[in-house]
Amino acid sequence: MKFPSKCPYCAKDIAENICENHLFPPADNKDLGLQMERHKCIHCGKYIYVFRRYVDNKSIPIPHSEIESYYPISTAVPYPERVKYISPVSYAIYQQTCHAREAGLNTLLGAGLRMSLEWLVWDYLIKVQNEPEEELEKLTLAKRINRLQINDDASVCVDIIRIFGNDQIHIKKLFSLPCETAFAVYNMLLSVLDRKLEMDEYKQTLNDYQQSGK
């Protein structure tokens, strides 16, 4: 195991940056002790704990190059900040789904993507399109999706993820789509929505400027 290349908290590139080091002596007269290092991410300021084995040779610790383990071991998942702001619950579920994929829990991925999509649609309708919550509660996910004011590319992505998620939670599979493709489609959806939200910001800036000039 090597030192992680990405910060588990902010997902930015990191390198070894030891700010604290502790040595725990070997137990039961063994020659291998445990070395705990605390590394600080220069971007977010949070800590990564790294554990190595070392050889206690006449009380001179010689660290091994390989890492025994580190904490936290799950890396933060990149996610557009604008979309995360709109739907933090969707982001949290998507991150958990990605961690399940890392752990090989493939049977959970379809349900995770669908749950993340449902929250994303819900929050988008309420926070971006100002849809009344009491009306949305009466609708199925498919009917909520039909109310989305998004372009064709985003609509296709949403439908694929919804169908994939529904299919994965049933015994009989009707939709033949690899999990990796579903994740790629989900990320494509995030990218399209992020661009739309960015354009909405530009339009608002232009409108504010035009209004101020009257």
Image (cartoon, grey):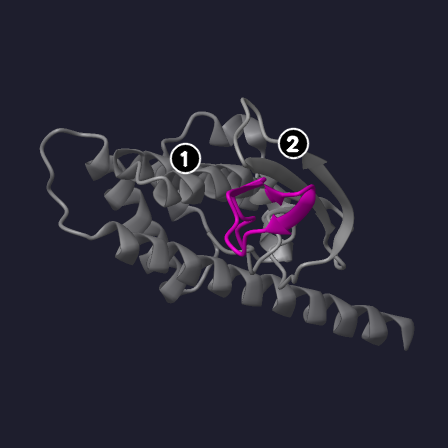
Rendering coords of residue 148 (x, y %) = 46, 50
**Magenta extent:** 56-78
Residue 26, quarter of the rendered image: top right
Please state which of the two labelled residues, at mark 1 or mark 2, is closer to the viewer: 2
Looking at numbered disc 2 in the image, what kind of residue is underneath it? Answer: Pro
- Which sits in the foreground, 96 or 119? 96
Q: Residues within 10 Å of mark 1 (few under 14, many from 20)?
A: some
Residue sitting at x 62%, y 64%: 13
Residue sitting at x 35%, y 60%: 184
Quarter containing the C terminus = bottom right
Q: Which residue does the numbered mark 1 point to in the structure image? A: 115
Q: Which residue does the numbered mark 2 point to in the structure image? A: 25
Above or below, comparing residue 209 to residue 15 in the picture: below
Rendering coords of residue 33 (x, y %) = 59, 36
- Which sits in the foreground, 112 or 63? 63
Rendering coords of residue 208 (x, y %) = 82, 68
- Which sits in the foreground, 148 or 21? 21
Looking at numbered disc 1 in the image, what kind of residue is underneath it? Answer: Met
